[in-house]
Image: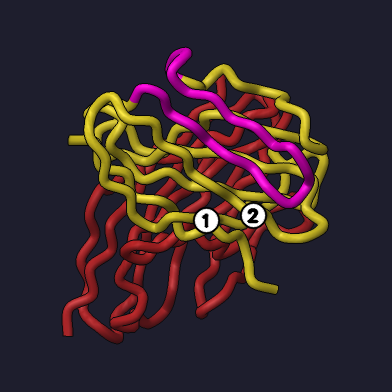
Chain colours: A red, B yellow
Amino acid sequence: AQSVTQLDSHVSVSEGTPVLLRCNYSSSYSPSLFWYVQHPNKGLQLLLKYTSAATLVKGINGFEAEFKKSETSFHLTKPSAHMSDAAEYFCVAGGATNKLIFGTGTLLAVQP
Amino acid sequence: DAGVIQSPRHEVTEMGQEVTLRCKPISGHNSLFWYRQTMMRGLELLIYFNNNVPIDDSGMPEDRFSAKMPNASFSTLKIQPSEPRDSAVYFCASSPSSTPYNSPLHFGNGTRLTVT
């Protein structure tokens, strides 16, 4: 069965420092993988998507994620956090099961 | 494009009342989803339409919940009668793909439902 694990429920960083949000997936086939961001009182917005074309995926707002099949990981990174990055981030897997599997989310706090 | 539009943004109602949530997907999108988000359960898929036809309604909690998509530009989610445990944020999302599980979803801003 397909599953998504976000390893941290909360991450706190200082403005200007790097961001790392971890995601591991479990799948018997090569999945499609997404990262979404949810700001307070808003819907989810797509940050980036992995489609097997390239293992390093660049998204909006300076975020990127690297697909590592050997580690079954799809961690989200950003070199320098901005106050506006404070939000909840969801790792999502999709594919042959015809279901989108959402992780439980990671709440990112950015300290001034 | 205006994006996915949901109404109302907030709904407060008393237990036992009927509640209707509305969604206008992005024009040209042929897949539509209803999700429910709570602190305890996270995001749950309630129902998925493709070309206005319900494809997967296995997530609909019980018979009190019903969803319709009479045309490509409008969908409703109805709860009758409502109960306090239905309190949640309900999201509508649409996709231009007929295989949306491999494609990004476009979410509305949600309807926050409170049942007292």
Name the one closer to the observer, B108 or B14.
B14
Which residue is drawn at the image coordinates 49% and 29% (left, top)?
A: A3
Range shown magenta: B61-81
- Disc 2 marks which amino acid? Lys
Name the one closer to the observer, A106 or A78.
A106
Q: Report whether A47 appears left or right of A31.
A: left
Q: Report whether A64 appears left or right of A111.
A: right
Residue at the disc numbered 1: B6
Residue at the disc numbered 2: B24
Using the image, determine if residue B84 lies above or below residue A104. Answer: above
Which residue is drawn at the image coordinates 39% and 31% (left, top)?
A: B18
Label 2: how many residues lie within 10 Å, few (<14), some (14-19) or many (20+)? Answer: many
Chain identity of mark 2: B
Which residue is drawn at the image coordinates 43% and 28% (left, top)?
A: B79
Asked whether disc 1 touches disc 2, contact meaning CB atoms under 8 Å apart, the reply is yes
The residue positioned farthest toward the front in the image shown: B17
Question: Residue A40 at what x, y percent from top left?
Answer: 31, 64
Using the image, determine if residue B108 lies above or below residue A101. Answer: below
Q: Earlier in the sequence, mark 1 or mark 2?
A: 1
* Dominant SS in magenta: strand
Label 1: how many residues lie within 10 Å, few (<14), some (14-19) or many (20+)? Answer: many
Tell me the element at label 2: strand
Chain identity of mark 1: B
Q: Would you identify the image quadrant in which residue A17 lies?
A: bottom left
Q: Would you identify the image quadrant in which residue B27 lies?
A: bottom right
